[in-house]
Amino acid sequence: MTASAIDTPAHAALRAIGWPHAGDVPDGPWREAMAAHPQAAPARVVEQHRTGYLVAQAPDEAVGVESLPEWQLPRCPPEQRAAVGDWVLVEDGRVVLLLPRRTVIKRGAAGEHYRQQVIAANIDRVLVVCGLDGDFNPRRIERYLLLVRGGGAEPLIVLTKADHDAAEVDAARAALAEVVGADVPVIAVNARDAASAAALSPWLGAGVTAVLVGSSGAGKSTLTNTLLGRERMRTGEVRASDDRGRHTTTHRALIPLPSGACLIDTPGMRELKPTGEEVIAENFTDIEALAEQCRFRDCGHCNEPGCAVRAAVQAGTLDPARFANFLKLSDEHAAAARQLEERRRNPQPTTGSRRRR
């Protein structure tokens, strides 16, 4: 099978792992890229490793391929390399091209220099998994929602360990009411119980690609095993001292589910830094609405007179913790945006050069 001519059986196999086109590839960047590499075949990245990838053209048929040489150079921005969920063109055991992404979830990488890290690409839904224990943190969920919405995917909050007291579930839903908004579903499940996990079925239909994100020990791998119907992802115990789990998932992997969906499990993430490409206002619409009532249009919500946002905090109608997180994320986002703009003005070369002797 080549990119220029995808026959019916091969097309059906690609559709089973999330190929987005029901028929011929429409005019546009994908069709142009495939026409430029007529002998290459499309494949999906299911695992990413240091110098290469596992890619698939059908469910459970992954093969190893080499990456583009420039992707292995230290100065190559990580977001320009293929990631799990990406579609690539492969020829003679090598990736020859990364096809344009429909959606992506990424974060600012740890460290003092500006870098981005792609968590998953070409996803339809992001399941933010949070345990109903010490892992539950509305402020952290706000960070996840900022990253998810910034990449164009649909967020869904999944509360695991819902076999605990029902009052805990109600309290968590109440705490998330102003955080997630009416457009984000909040589903509580027992990650070990198939009947309970079936509540996620409406969001995991055939052709859908979803990614699980959340802290280590939140129940992502347990939920993956339950949805899969067998144990594939290794799980670990959660420490009683702080409700934190060990990093039982050590790399990202795309897994076809019996429902026809594809699921990407990810390692737990401790840091969730903005990339500078997100839109803060989309995630704090309540605060933005209050800001419209401030006396000064450029109000920084600090000590300015007539600040409607601080008035709401003082009146008890705006959670002080949510407001504090809004200020913190706004500062982090602004700093990341400045670094991103600087990098765009002064891009680093991503190809090597040889010195003449």
Image (spheres, rainbow, N blue to C red):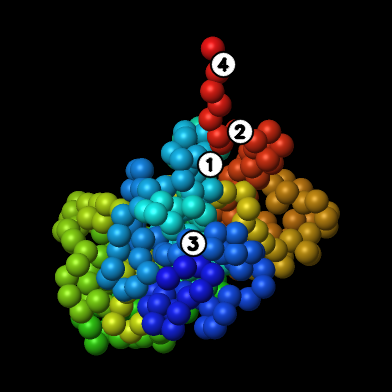
Considering the image in quadrants, where does the C terminus appear?
top right
Q: CA distance from mark 1 to mark 3?
A: 28 Å
* Residue 89: percent from left, percent from top: 48, 60
Crowd class of label 1 (few under 14; some 14 to 19; many from 20; radius 10 Å): some
Mark 1, mark 3: which one is toward the viewer?
Answer: 3
* Residue 281: percent from left, percent from top: 67, 62
Q: Left or right of 165: which side holds 252?
A: right
Marks 4 & 3, CB-CB < 8 Å contact: no
Marks 1 & 4, CB-CB < 8 Å contact: no
Residue type marked 2: Gln
Can residue 95 be spotted in the picture?
yes
Q: Earlier in the sequence, mark 3 or mark 2?
A: 3
Marks 2 & 1, CB-CB < 8 Å contact: yes
**Residue under circle 2?**
348
Residue type marked 3: Gln
From the viewer's side, name the closer residue of 68 and 238.
Answer: 68
What label does residue 77 carry, if any?
A: 1
**Residue under circle 3?**
39
From the viewer's side, name the closer residue of 225 and 178.
Answer: 225
From the viewer's side, name the closer residue of 209 and 306.
Answer: 209
**Residue under circle 4?**
356
Q: CA distance from mark 4 to mark 3?
A: 35 Å
Q: CA distance from mark 3 to mark 2?
A: 31 Å
Q: Residue at x 55, y 18 (%)?
A: 355
Q: Residue at x 83, y 55 (%)?
A: 297
